[in-house]
Image (spheres, grey):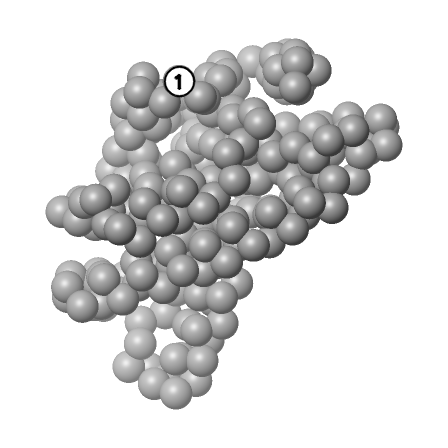
């Protein structure tokens, strides 16, 4: 019973949370211990702690969380972009190269809602003129992060994503423009990342899980 790292990627509403619940139930049924992690560059616990501290110190000088004109103006400053990206990557390094490896060493199944490539897409959307892939720090993150045993990309049309997301609470939803761009970036990346098992997530949840389970059984 070896440790396993399983990652799920995809746009909002693609069913990642639903499939993670089914994966956890499956592994617990066969006596595996699971660790669940949700990660997003810039929204990890370390970064949230820094944001909280800065807001206490700076007060209303900092924009609130979420989309706003003030936040957009701040992030147009080069030094703000670079500082935010560096801190985001450093905290991901802590989570991926230390926390996940520790859980794997303990023999657990680690299930990640989003992983490296989801964050790369986030960075491309937020900072389209910054070539994150060429940064040494990003390459170090990729190199030190454990390689998943199974990677799933759940794909649904943008229209279905919008419909599903409208039916649940999302404090910071994507704009229509960003949702369209996110879908295109996942679609493009799926053609170059042969490690991803692309799953049609428009189907009934049990049918989707059967495809995921088939891959899990082969590990």
Residue at (40, 52) in percent of width and height: 41
The answer to whether 28 is drawn above or below residue 64 in the figure is: above
Report crowding for label 1: few under 14, some 14 to 19, many 20 or more residues within 10 A (C-alpha).
few
The percent position of residue 164, horizontal first and vertical second, equals 50, 31
Q: Nearer the viewer, residue 97 or 8?
A: 97
Report the number of numbered marks. Answer: 1
Is residue 173 visible from the viewing direction of this image? no
Seen in the picture, residue 7 relative to 38 is either above or below; the reply is: above
- Relative to residue 118, is residue 103 depicted above or below? below
Q: Which of 71 and 89 is in front in this view?
A: 89
Question: Based on the displayed image, in which of its 4 quarters is residue 159 positioned?
Answer: top left
Which of the image's four quarters has the N terminus? top right
Residue visible at 15% across and 66% down? 77
Residue 219 in the image: x percent, y percent? 65, 19
- The residue that appears at 54% across and 32% down in the rendered structure is 148
Residue at the spot 26% in from the left edge and 33% down from the top edge: 181
Rendered location of residue 96, percent (x, y): 52, 49
Q: In which quarter of the image is residue 12?
A: top left
In the displayed structure image, the side of residue 211 where residue 82 appears, left or right: left
Residue under pointer 1:
194
């Amino acid at each position: 019973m070896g440790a396993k790292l399983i990652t799920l990627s995809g746009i909002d509403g693609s069913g990642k949370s639903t499939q993670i619940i089914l994966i956890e139930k499956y592994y617990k049924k066969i006596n595996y211990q699971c660790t669940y992690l949700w990660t997003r560059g810039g929204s990890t616990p370390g970064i949230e702690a820094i944001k909280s501290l800065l807001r206490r110190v700076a007060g209303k000088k900092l924009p609130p969380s979420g989309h706003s004109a003030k936040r957009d103006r701040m992030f147009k400053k080069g030094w703000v972009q670079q500082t935010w990206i560096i801190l985001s990557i450093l905290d991901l390094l802590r989570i991926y190269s230390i926390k996940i490896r520790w859980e794997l060493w303990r023999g657990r199944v680690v299930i990640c809602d989003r992983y490296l490539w989801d964050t790369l897409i986030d960075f491309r959307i937020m900072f389209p003129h910054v070539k994150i892939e060429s940064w040494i720090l990003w390459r170090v993150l990729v190199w030190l992060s454990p390689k998943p045993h199974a990677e799933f990309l759940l794909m649904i049309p943008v229209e279905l994503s919008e419909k599903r997301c409208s039916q649940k609470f999302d404090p910071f939803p994507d704009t229509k423009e960003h949702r369209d761009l996110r879908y295109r970036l996942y679609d493009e990346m799926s053609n170059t990342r042969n490690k991803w098992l692309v799953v049609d997530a428009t189907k009934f949840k049990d049918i989707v899980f059967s495809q995921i389970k088939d891959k899990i059984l082969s590990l």
